[in-house]
Image (cartoon, rainbow, N blue to C red):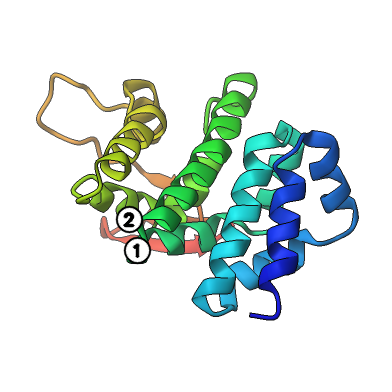
Amino acid sequence: MLFQQPLEAVGNIVTGDDVQTQAVIDSNIIPMLVEILSKAEFKTRKEAAWAITNATSGGTAEQIKYLVSQGVIKPLCDLLTVMDSKIVQVALSGLENILRVGKQDAFQTDGINKFAVMVEEAYGLDKIEFLQSHDNEEIYRKAFEIIEYYFSGEDEDDKLMPGIDQNSDQLPILPWSQHASGRLSVLNSNGLCGSTET
């Protein structure tokens, strides 16, 4: 309860423009917001979620990347399972804004939306998929749109599974694969997978 009014003030500040968002970033408040978003009681987490999502709405791509670097994705994903529909919508909006920046980056770099990978690693994709059957129409539509736009696409499937023949029923046996965790799976002489750290 002690943090709610200051959090509301921060949320209102970052609602403005990227200059105001930068002022909040420069004051080193974001790490505290992320901690509150992760660990505080629910009412306080709600205010932190509003502040973070407002920052993703009015911030620049670089500011949103900074928010991601501070760890906002996992706690936003964790809010996707709460009973409060409004906060689920807030978390979805924040994640969508982050995914949009990731997609823009992917076009300019290696084609992989690194923020989408981070959402998947935080079990956010599973939660978003589940929200497609939510009672609230706005939530299930937003969940569908996010999955459709950021998590489905033939070009992404081709990158994830190179060498797959779309016309074949068989999957190729690949000698190795790199996992997001940095582990490398290698087929040994018995044809079994083992893993090594890279």
Asked whether, in this view, residue 2 is left or right of residue 88, the answer is right
Number of numbered markers? 2
The vertical placement of 103 against 74, above or below, is above
* Res 94 → quadrant: top right
Nearest-to-viewer mark from 2 and 1: 1
Residue type (three-letter) at the residue carrying disc 1: Thr
- The earlier-in-sequence mark between 2 and 1 is 1
| Residue visible at 57% across and 58% down in the picture | 49
Label 1 belongs to which residue?
A: 81
| Residue visible at 49% across and 38% down in the picture | 96
Gap in Å between the C-alphas at discs 2 and 1?
7 Å
Q: Give the percent coordinates (x, y) of residue 41.
A: 54, 80
Residue type (three-letter) at the residue carrying disc 2: Lys
Q: Nearer the viewer, residue 107 or 16?
A: 16
Q: Give the percent coordinates (x, y) of residue 194.
A: 38, 63
On residue 94, the disc is: none
| Residue visible at 70% across and 80% down in the picture | 2
Q: Give the percent coordinates (x, y) of residue 122.
A: 46, 59
Kindly state the secondary structure of the residue where label 2 is placed: helix
Q: Give the percent coordinates (x, y) of residue 179.
A: 46, 52
Residue 162 visible somewhere in the drawing: no
| Residue visible at 13% across and 19% down in the picture | 167
Residue 183 visible somewhere in the drawing: yes
Label 2 belongs to which residue?
A: 127
Does the CB distance between marks 2 and 1 fall below 8 Å? yes
Q: Nearer the viewer, residue 57 or 148?
A: 57
Name the residue furthest left: 169
In the picture, the quarter occupied by the N terminus is bottom right
Asked whether, in this view, residue 152 is left or right of residue 165, the answer is right
Q: Residues within 10 Å of mark 1 (few under 14, many from 20)?
A: some
